[in-house]
C-alpha cells in the first residue's frame, strides 16, 4: 500500500496505532525509559467477538519491537494465543503462533510504501466431531480477523495523518 505521507510520520503513527493499548517492556541496556517505550512492547488480553452469529473468545499474548533507520522502519509482532470458545462451544487444545511484520519504506519524498507480512501456525490438539469442518472454519475466522485487524490499523494511520498526527 502506498501512503502519501513522509515515512517517519507514517512510522510514528503506525507504531502508535498498533501499540496504543500495549505496555512498554523493561528498559534495554543503554536505553532511556522513553527510548524503550518507543521500541518494545508487550500485551496480553482476551478478545470476545461474534462470528457467524456465535460467540468467539480468544486469549492473545503479544510482544513487539520497532526498528527505525534513516529510510525504513520495521515493526515485528510475535504472539502465542489460544482459542477459548468458538462457534458456540468451549474449546481447549487450540493454540496458535503468529508473527507479523510491517515494513515502511521511504518510497519517494513524502510517499511511504507499506508492506505487511503475516504468518500463523494453528495447532489443534483436541478431539471433536466434525473436526475438519471445525479446523477449516477456525482457520478462515482467524485469517479474516487478522486481515480486518491490519486493515483497521492502516485506516487508523491514514485518519490520524489526515488529522495532523503526529504533528
Image (spheres, rainbow, N blue to C red):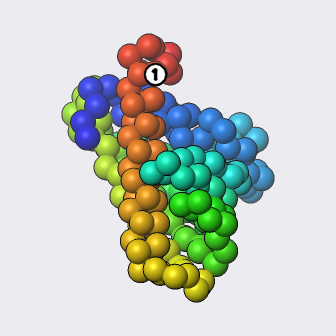
Name which residue lies at 46% across and 21% down: 160
- In the displayed orientation, state which residue is furthest to the left: 108
Task: From the top left corner, tell me how far across and down residue 115 is, in percent.
Answer: 31, 49
Density class for disc 1 (Cα within 10 Å; few <14, some 14-19, many ≥20) is some
Look at the picture and state if 60 lies above or below 32.
below
| Residue 81 in view in this figure | no
- Give the quarter of the image for residue 62: bottom right
Name which residue lies at 36% across and 58% down: 117
Name which residue lies at 46% across and 72% down: 134
Look at the picture and state if 153 lies above or below 69.
above
Look at the picture and state if 10 lies above or below 118.
above
Q: Left of 73 or right of it: where is 125? A: right
Task: From the top left corner, tell me how far across and down residue 48 is, in percent.
Answer: 63, 48
Q: Secondary structure at mark 1?
A: helix
Name which residue lies at 66% across and 66% down: 90
Please name the residue that numbered disc 1 is placed on: 160
Q: As rendered, which of 4 and 152 lies closer to the eye?
A: 152
| Residue 27 in view in this figure | yes
Q: As rendered, which of 94 and 23 lies closer to the eye?
A: 94
Q: As rendered, which of 88 and 67 lies closer to the eye?
A: 88
Amino acid at each position: 500500500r502506498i501512503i502519501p505521507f513522509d515515512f517517519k510520520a507514517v512510522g510514528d503513527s503506525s507504531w502508535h496505532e498498533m501499540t496504543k493499548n500495549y505496555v512498554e517492556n523493561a528498559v534495554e541496556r543503554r536505553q532511556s525509559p522513553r527510548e524503550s517505550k518507543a521500541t518494545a512492547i508487550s500485551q496480553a488480553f482476551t478478545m470476545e467477538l461474534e462470528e457467524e452469529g456465535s460467540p468467539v473468545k480468544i486469549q492473545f499474548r503479544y510482544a513487539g519491537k520497532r526498528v527505525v533507520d534513516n529510510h525504513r522502519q520495521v515493526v515485528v509482532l510475535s504472539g502465542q494465543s489460544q482459542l477459548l470458545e468458538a462457534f458456540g462451544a468451549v474449546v481447549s487444545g487450540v493454540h496458535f503462533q503468529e508473527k507479523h511484520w510491517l515494513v515502511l519504506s521511504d518510497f519517494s519524498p513524502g510517499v511511504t510504501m507499506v508492506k505487511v507480512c503475516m504468518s500463523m501456525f494453528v495447532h489443534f490438539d483436541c478431539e471433536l466431531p466434525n473436526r475438519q469442518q471445525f479446523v477449516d472454519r477456525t482457520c478462515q475466522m482467524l485469517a479474516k480477523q487478522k486481515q480486518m485487524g491490519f486493515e483497521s490499523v492502516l485506516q487508523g494511520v491514514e485518519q490520524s495523518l489526515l488529522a495532523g498526527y503526529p504533528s
